[in-house]
Amino acid sequence: MRAGEPSGRDVLTRSIRGQARRVGLGAALGCVHQLGEALVPVLIGVVIDQAVAGRNAGRLILWLAVLAVMYVALSWSFRLGARAGERGAEEAAHTLRLAIVRRVLDARGGAEEGRLPGELANVATEDAKRVGAVNMALMSGIWAVAGVTASALALLLTSVTLGLIVLLGTPVLLWLGHLLSKPLERRSEAEQDRAAHASGVAADLVAGIRVLKGLGAQQAAVERYRRTSRVSLAATLRAARAESWQTGLVLALTGGFIALIALVGGRLALDGSLTLGQLVSAVGLALFLLGPLETLAWVNADLAQGRASAARVAEVLASVPAVADGDAPVPDPLRGELRLRGVRLGGLDGVDLDLPAGRLTGIAVTDPACAEALLRCLGRETDPESGSVELDGVPLTRLDPVGLRAAVLVAAHDAVLFDGSLAANVAPGEESDLAEGEPDLRTERAMAAAHADEVARSLPHGAATGVGEGGRSLSGGQRQRVLLARALRAGSPVLVVHDPTTAVDAVTEARIADGLREIRQGRTTVVVTNNPALLAVTDRVVLLDGGRVGAEGTHAELVRADATYRTAVLA
């Protein structure tokens, strides 16, 4: 975590507090509304005692006019207060979603560890929404407390006994409601965990649907999701049962409380302690109390669910970065020389390797695990267990991850395409510069080098054609060419590509190799592959064998002199 950067829980707390002014306004308007609601039964009692009982038509008209004004004020205060509350809840949820996305996209990584993409999506949507709704719940709770307080004061003025019942009984009801919400909180957290896992499994299966069909494993995939979905359903039903029990018991307690107030009020009216108008007011206030007390029960349940979701959101925001932070800027000017010294990670066993600036270097491997570990080190997705990786003599651990990502682009062979046009996929984030999906000159050069322009010509609307989610409308070779074009178009000072042509035919592969060399002329480029067509155009090839550098030279030299290299590349 960067120095001075807030923790995940701090961001979570700030996202809720950031709406305090708006929620405060809504709470104030709501309190005005609740005070008015509590005054309505009191005014009706006054009308009965002063106008109806006294048969005074003038006073009756006056008090009816007062009631009409009161109802207009009630309508507007409720509408404005509810609007402020809902807006506060939605803006808080939006702030949280942005914070979660920023954490997931953080150059230091770590948020995705142990979580499927669907799980993160669930946290950013459902959990963020529930936490945002806490704003509305808090505001509603303030309204309800204001309503209960106004009713208690009105009843105290009418009858000390009735007022004391409300003042003493309400805290007991709230305490019981809080106790009853505890099981709901636990089961709500479990429900969201299971739902997020089910979403993650579904997204995982959909992303790999072509592979599953090719393997004939559709039924196994369906069974896997069915089992996951059943677990999620069971957790949801347990949470629903907990919520129904909590709501039912709280309503029963509230109903008994209202009945007690009505009973005591009736006894006081019978012995003459209350007038007819006061009795009507007392009964009306008791019935009015039903609304605030039900609201408090709902607030308890909503806060329980919000606390469970808040814990999940905070866990993502507070996730430990995969790599330590660095504060040194990328060297300027940047030559682009990479150097590995004694690097140990995964299949790498003390690798010493120099990747010269401005050169096209090929790296062949006898073990795919070495390629994966090398890519993670160069892209600084993981720091080596020992040894160091340097850029222009500066250890990557000292560099700012954001600046490093801009300087060194590692294009993995399993990268994904986004739903949108082909041109927008080659130049993501710059759709505003692409007129109706048509590529600009820089994009055209990258597409030509990767021979993705042939892909565009084969599509009905050229580069403006949509490729579908994950590029599903394209073949494997077409997707690879578009992905390579995207990497070339980025124009990073240092580019590392991994097996960019495994699904491309031999003729196209040779053309892509020439295009790659031409467009990257003078810039540091590393091609991690065992493909002879790509290795043949490199300035130098390094063979990683057994986790160490086994041989170095040009492709032609290694083919002639090294049997291990021939086996790895030509077999």
Image (cartoon, rainbow, N blue to C red):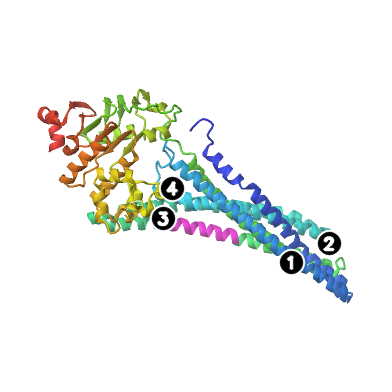
Which comes before the other along the chain, label 4 or label 1?
A: 1
Q: Which residue is mark 2?
A: 158
Q: Earlier in the sequence, mark 1 or mark 3?
A: 1
Packing grade of label 3 (10 A; few <14, some 14-19, many >=20) is some
What separation in Å lies between label 2 and label 1 (alpha carbons)?
Answer: 23 Å
Q: Amino acid at mark 1?
A: Tyr
Identify which amino acid the numbered label 4 is placed on. Leu
Q: Secondary structure at mark 1?
A: helix
Query: Reading the chain from its start, which is encountered first: label 4 or label 2?
Result: 4
Q: Residue 156: where, in percent of width, then height?
A: 82, 58
Q: Which residues are magenta?
A: 229-247
Kindly indicate the quadrant of the structure image that contains residue 564.
top left
Q: Residue at x 49, y 32 (%)?
A: 2
The mark closer to the camera, 1 or 3, is: 1
Closer to the eye: label 2 or 1: 1
Give the residue pinned by disc 4: 120
Count every numbered label the image shows and give the total.
4
> Please, what is the three-letter code of the amino acid marked with disc 3?
Val
Task: Where is residue 209? Give x, y as percent.
Answer: 29, 55
Q: Residue furthest front?
A: 441
Please identify, in this view, whether the residue under mark 4 or under mark 3 is nearer the observer.
4
Q: Which mark is residue 71?
A: 1
Instruction: Using residue 140 as the reference point, say whether residue 188 is left or right of it.
Output: left
Instruction: Check if mark 2's residue and mark 3's residue have beta carbons within 8 Å.
Output: no
Q: CA distance from mark 1 to mark 3?
A: 49 Å
| Label 4 with label 3: CB-CB less than 8 Å | no
Tag 3 residue:
231
Magenta stretch contains residue 245: yes
